[in-house]
Amino acid sequence: MRLSFLIVLVVLASGQRLWGQTKADRVPSWPDVIQKPYEHLRTPDIGLKPLLRTADAQNITTQEAWEKQRQSLRTAWLKKLGEPPAKPSKLDIQVESHEVEPDHIRQLVTFASEGDDRIRAYLLQPKDLKPGEKRPAVVVFHPTTKETLREPVGLGKRQELALALQLVRRGYITLSPECFIMKGSGARLQAQEIARRRSGWTGLGKMTFDASRCVDYLEALPQVDGLRIGCIGHSLGAKEVLYAMAFEPRYRAGVFNEGGIGLRMSNWTDPWYLTEAMKADIPALENHQVMALIAPRAFLVMGGEDADGDASWAFVKEARSVYTLLGVGERIGLHSHRAGHSFPPKARQLAYEWLDYWLEFRP
């Protein structure tokens, strides 16, 4: 049994599908799609500190040296997010509703976050799940909208952002949690309450904690393959994807659309994210470092020139240096869809193919 498990891990690490296909059988070259179209772009000097250079200006050329750098960066960023509380020992899962749709089952669930706080989320499962079968799962983080967790599952007005519904129809199990800042009292007051309850803990720190609890919940479901959990998000949800992947290693692949990858490209210093205190550390600390913490797992940036787009290439290119050092340069990239602050059909299709590929799933 143990030997079989080790064989599975070796196969996954090598990039080979368990059913005998290599990734190259489906996508000839990810770099052709998500890197080469942007290689010609001029990348102005915006003060991004090179990831593969130490504080004393020594070049990092080995994986061992990068690991030391990674630990240093991780410590610095965890300090900015603030000290999280200990996780509760129990999830205390409750099912509030159960609805059967023609092609999937929708449940409204809640489970413990921290303290007295609970996470509300929609769980979608395909109706064709067989007894004992395990499927990959995707956490879908919603954008800033009053419809919160209802929008991803198709119960909102913007059907183009019903990402969880589209993914469950593709065959995935999905979880769509409600971001804490969208609860009744509003983002600013929610952030103040977090700071009051736990000194120094930021809103983005709370979001990252909740993203980890979502994985705890999915791993508790027997129908979920815990080795194949991904995440996707638009706008606010994209921000959650970046930090969820950086600080929760159980997320294997992610898609970030129109979140504003740079700290100066969007409202990252608002009270419910990193707060104005972060401004003094920019650009010594920037999100290319957070992206590098995701390596070697797969991360795709998408944008339409509103929050993201071609301007994101400087961040992707710098983070790619770490991926390349680790021998997985194809696992990071950019797709500039040039459709403003939206998630157009072709971009969504590419995002789903990215998740299929790295989560080892054939719809």
Image (cartoon, rainbow, N blue to C red):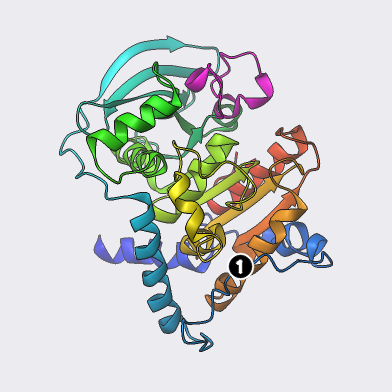
Report the amino acid beneath label 1.
Leu
Q: Residue at x 20, y 26 (%)?
A: 116
Q: Is residue 85 left or right of residue 344?
A: left
Number of residue marks:
1
Span colored in magenta: 143-165
Residue 33 in the figure: left or right of residue 320: right
Picture coordinates of residue 311 (x, y %)? 74, 54
- Eyeballing the image, is 337 above or below 170? below
In the displayed structure, does residue 86 sit left or right of residue 266?
Answer: left
The verdict on residue 158 being magenta is yes
Q: Is residue 246 visible?
A: yes
Q: Position of residue 151 (x, y in %)?
A: 56, 20
Toward the viewer: 331 or 188?
Answer: 188
Q: Nearer the viewer, residue 52 or 196?
A: 196
Q: Identify the image quadrant of residue 210.
A: top left
User: Badge 1 is on which residue?
Assistant: 48
Task: Give the image location of residue 303, x and y in percent.
Answer: 71, 44
How crowded pointer 1 is (Cα within 10 Å; few <14, some 14-19, many 20+) is rated as some
Residue drawn at x 38%, y 63% is: 76
- Residue 122 in the image: x percent, y percent? 43, 22
Q: In percent of the image, x 77 and y 44: which residue is there?
A: 305
Identify the main secondary structure in magenta. loop
Which of the 4 quarters of the picture holds residue 339?
top right
Q: Residue furthest left?
A: 89
Find out whether residue 350 is within the magenta segment. Answer: no
For label 1, the SS is loop
For the C terminus, the image quarter is top right
Q: Residue 22, can we see it? A: no
**Residue 166 horizontal side relative to residue 2, left or right:** right
